[in-house]
Amino acid sequence: MASDGFPVYARNGYAEANNSTSEIVKLKSSYKLKNTPDSGRPDTVTVLNGGMGQGTTYPNTKIEMGAFTQDFEYIENHGDLDECNGRVGVTPEFPEGIYYYVVTDDFPYFSRCLKGDF
């Protein structure tokens, strides 16, 4: 249960949100990795392996896209879920339907926003 009172489910749900007889599928986020980074986003970092005075320093190690939240954008209807990684639909516990959040295997994994009051 999220702090706003809505339930949280792991990755799977009905293919048709309001049809409990539809196939169970892995639900997909509607966030997509951007093609290019935002301006001002760091693109390199200095990595120190082994601690101070030990090991090796790797200056200007490239930071891959997907390392930061800002590397992703929400695209409505790109996946199964809304901007809070949730949707309205029926569940075994709520056969009349309810808004619920979904923990996904891909970004954002868990909701970065809440729909309800808390």
Image (spheres, rainbow, N blue to C red):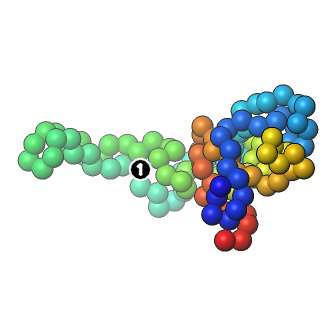
Looking at the picture, does residue 63 appear above or below residue 6? above
Locate residue 29, reporting x and y percent.
69, 44
Can I make out residue 38 in this image? yes
Locate residue 55, reporting x and y percent.
13, 39
Quadrant that contains the N terminus:
bottom right
**Is 38 or 54 nearer to us in this picture?**
54
**Mark 1 packing: few (<14 Cα in 10 Å), some, or many (20+)?**
few
Taking 18 as reference, is 32 left or right? left
Quadrant that contains the C terminus:
bottom right
Number of residue marks: 1
What element does badge 1 sit on? loop
Residue at the image point whose x is 69% and y is 56% from the top: 84
Residue at the image point whose x is 87% and y is 45% from the top: 95
Residue at the image point whose x is 80% and y is 41% from the top: 92
**Is 39 or 31 nearer to us in this picture?**
31
Looking at the picture, does residue 77 appear above or below residue 5? above
**Is 64 or 96 nearer to us in this picture?**
96
| Disc 1: which residue | 43
Locate residue 103, reporting x and y percent.
63, 44
Can I make out residue 75 in this image? no
As drawn, the residue found furthest toward the top would be 23
| Quadrant hosting residue 111 | bottom right
Taking 103 as reference, is 79 left or right? right
Residue at the image point whose x is 26% and y is 45% from the top: 47
As drawn, the residue found furthest toward the left would be 53
Locate residue 117, reporting x and y percent.
71, 71
